[in-house]
Image (cartoon, rainbow, N blue to C red):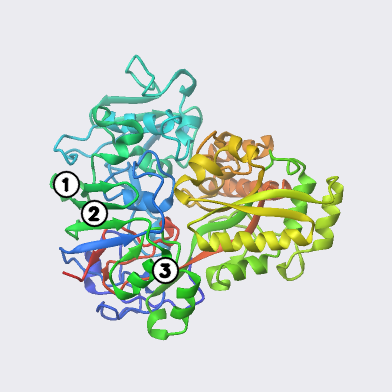
Amino acid sequence: MRRSAVAAIAVVSSASLLLAGCSKADDGDSGAEGNAKANAATTGVVNASDKKGGTVTYAMADAPESFDPGNTYYSFIYNFSRLYARPLTTFKPGPGEKGNELVADLAESMGVPSDGGKTWTYKIRKGVKYSDGTPVTAKDVKYAVERSNFARDVLSNGPNYFQQLLADPAKYKGPYKDKSDKGLDSIQTPDDHTIVFKLNKPFADFDYLVSAPQTAPVPKAKDKGSDYTKSILSSGSYKFETYKDGQQVVLVRNEHWDAKTDPLRKQYPDKIVLNLKVSQATIDKDLMSGDIVADLKGGGVDAQTQAQILAKEDLKANTDNTYGGRLVYTAINTKVKPFDNVECRKAVQYAIDKVSVQTSMGGPIRGDIASTVMPNDLPGHEKFDLYPTEGNKGDVAKAKQHLKACGQEKISTFISARSDRQTEVDAATAVVASLKKAGIDAKIKQYPSSKYFSDYAGVPSFTKKENIGLMMMQWGADWPTGYGFLQQVVHGKAIGQSGNTNLSELNDPAINKLLDDAIANTDESARQAAYIQVDKKVMEQAAIVPLSYFKVLNYRSPHGTNMTASAAWSGQYDYLNIGTTKK
C-alpha cells in the first residue's frame, strides 16, 4: 500500500457510497467539514457529499503546456482534462491504491483482444454528445489518436506509444498532411460506435494505454491544430466558458452531458475556475484560508508552508502525505560530452550527496532516498544499489577515480531545472554543491514548466547547443506497471526532437529489446522480472541518478468535498467529482 508514516485514518460519510469508485474507510467517523485527520484522503473519501452547486477553484504556479488533451503530458492535466475530455478508459475515482483500478469510460467496456493481442476492439457508448450537441463517433477517436501521435511538428507534447505500436505508421504523414483524408489503415472504424486498433506486435497493457487523453474524441472539422486548446469541444461533464491564455480557465456544466452515458462523473459544482501563474506562497495561503480547493499541480506546499503546517496539529490534520509512483532524479545526457563516456556518468553517480538533496526538498517527509529507477511503490520494484556510499552522502574519492578513468580532471557543464518549481531548483543547487567537490562544475539554467519539454530540456538539439549535460527531472508512471513507468524515459524509440522525455537520450539495444519483449509477453511475472532487468541495466549505464522516491505533502482544503488522494494521479486529488461546501 502507498501509505505514509503518519497515521492514516479516513473520515467519511455515508454519502461516499454515491461516489463512483469510492468506499467507506474502515475507521471513519462523520464526514463533517474540517473534521478529517492527516492522510484521511489516502484511504477514504473526505467530506463525501452529493451536494450540487457552487464554484470549485484551483490554482497553479505556472501554466500547463496545453489544455489540448492530445498535446499534454503532465499528470495533473491528464487528471483535470477528464472533466471535459473522455478517453476510452480511465481510472476509477478512489483513494490510494483503489484509484489504480482501470475502468471503461468513453468505451462501453474494456478492449477485446484478438490475433494474440495484436488487435484491440472497443465499442463507443451510444448517446454521448459534445458540448455543441453533436454526437461523438468512433471516427473522432481515430482522428484524435492520429493528430496527437502523427503531427509532432504541430503537437509535440505527450507520449508517442501509438506511433511505435500501430502497424503502418511509416506510410502515414499525419492528419495535416494526409491528402487522401483516409487516415491510418491500422485504426479502423467499421461503424460509428466501433474502433479497432491493429498493432505491429502484441501489447499486454493496451487497455492502460488508451486511458491517455490522446484517445479523447476530437472532431476533425473542429480541429485547429496548436490553437485547438483555445476552443476545445467538450465530451465530458464540463465545457470551457472562458479561456485566457496563461491567466485563467473557467469551466461550466456541459448541458449536453448525460449521466446515463457516464457512470463516473457526477457534475457537482456549477463552475470550475483555474487561476494560472499564481505564486506558490499565495496558493498555499489561499488553500489554508479556503479560497481555493486544491493546487492543481499537486506537487505539495512550499518549504515555508510545510514548516508552518507541521508545527500545528490542527493544520497537519488537513494534509495528505503519500507516495505517488514518482521518482525525482538527475538525468545525465549521454549525447553531451564528456557524459557520452560511462565513466564520467559514474563519477556523477558517486559525487552526489543524496541526503543533502533530500534535505533541500523538505526532508524525509518529501521522499525516501532512491537508488533505483523504478519507484519503491510501483508493482515489481526491487531494491538494489549499484553506487552505494556511506550514509548516502556521496563518495568524492570514488567520483574522482571514475573521472580519471574518463580522462578528465575537471568538467564544466550546465544543469537544467524548472523555474516555477522551487524545490526542484533547491535540489539542483544541492546537486551542484556536491559535484563541485569532485571537480564537476555545473551551473543551473532555469526554464518554465510549460516549455521545459517542448522548448528546452526536451529538445536534444537545444541541450547539445547549450552544453546541458545534466537535467533535473521528476517522473511518474503513465500507468502502474514497469512498462508504464520505464518506456518513455529509457527506450530509444521514445526519444523525440521536441517534447522528449528520455532526457538521457539512452538508446541501448539490450534495454530496448527487454522492454519490447516484455510487453508482448502474456506472463505477468515474466514481465515484472524483465522490468527489474531493465532497471539494473539503466543503472549500469549510469544514465539516471535516482535521488528520491517522491512523496507529496498536499494541504487538503476543508471546504472541498469528495476529496481522495489517488495513486493513479501521483498522489494528487482526483479532480473528477470534487465539490465544495461553499455557496
3D distance between C-alphas at marks 2 and 3: 32 Å
Residue that badge 3 annotates: 281
Looking at the rendering, which quadrant does residue 316 occupy?
Answer: bottom left
Check disc 3: other Cα within 10 Å, few if <14, some if 14-19, many if 20+.
Answer: some
Instruction: Give the amino acid type for the residue marked by disc 3 in the picture.
Output: Ala
State the quadrant of the C terminus. bottom left
Q: Which secondary structure, mark 1?
A: loop
The answer to whether one can see residue 368 in this image is yes
Q: SS class of the residue under badge 3?
A: helix
Q: Is residue 6 left or right of residue 510?
A: left
For image coordinates 37% across by 30% down, the residue present is 147
Total number of numbered labels?
Answer: 3
**In the picture shown, does residue 325 fall above or below 127?**
below
Relative to 538, residue 31 above or below: below
Q: Nearer the viewer, residue 296 or 210?
A: 296
Q: What's the residue at 28%, 31% (across, down)?
A: 223
Instruction: Choose the circle earlier in sequence order: 2 or 3.
Output: 2
Which one is in front in this view, the residue at disc 1 or the one at disc 3?
3
**What residue would you read off at disc 1?**
257
Residue 295 is situated, as x and y percent measured from the top left of the image, at 37, 63
Q: Position of residue 469 (x, y in %)?
A: 67, 46
| Cα separation between marks 2 and 1 | 10 Å
At x 39% / y 61%, what residue is drawn? 98
User: Residue pushed farthest top?
Assistant: 180
- Asked whether disc 1 touches disc 3, contact meaning CB atoms under 8 Å apart, the reply is no
Report if the CB atoms under discs 2 and 3 are less than 8 Å apart: no
Give the percent coordinates (x, y) of residue 25: 34, 73
Specify the amino acid type for callout 2: Arg
The residue at which mark 2 appears reads as 265
Q: Amino acid at mark 1?
A: Trp
Give the residue drawn at x 66%, y 49%. Answer: 414
Q: Residues within 10 Å of mark 2 (few under 14, many from 20)?
A: many
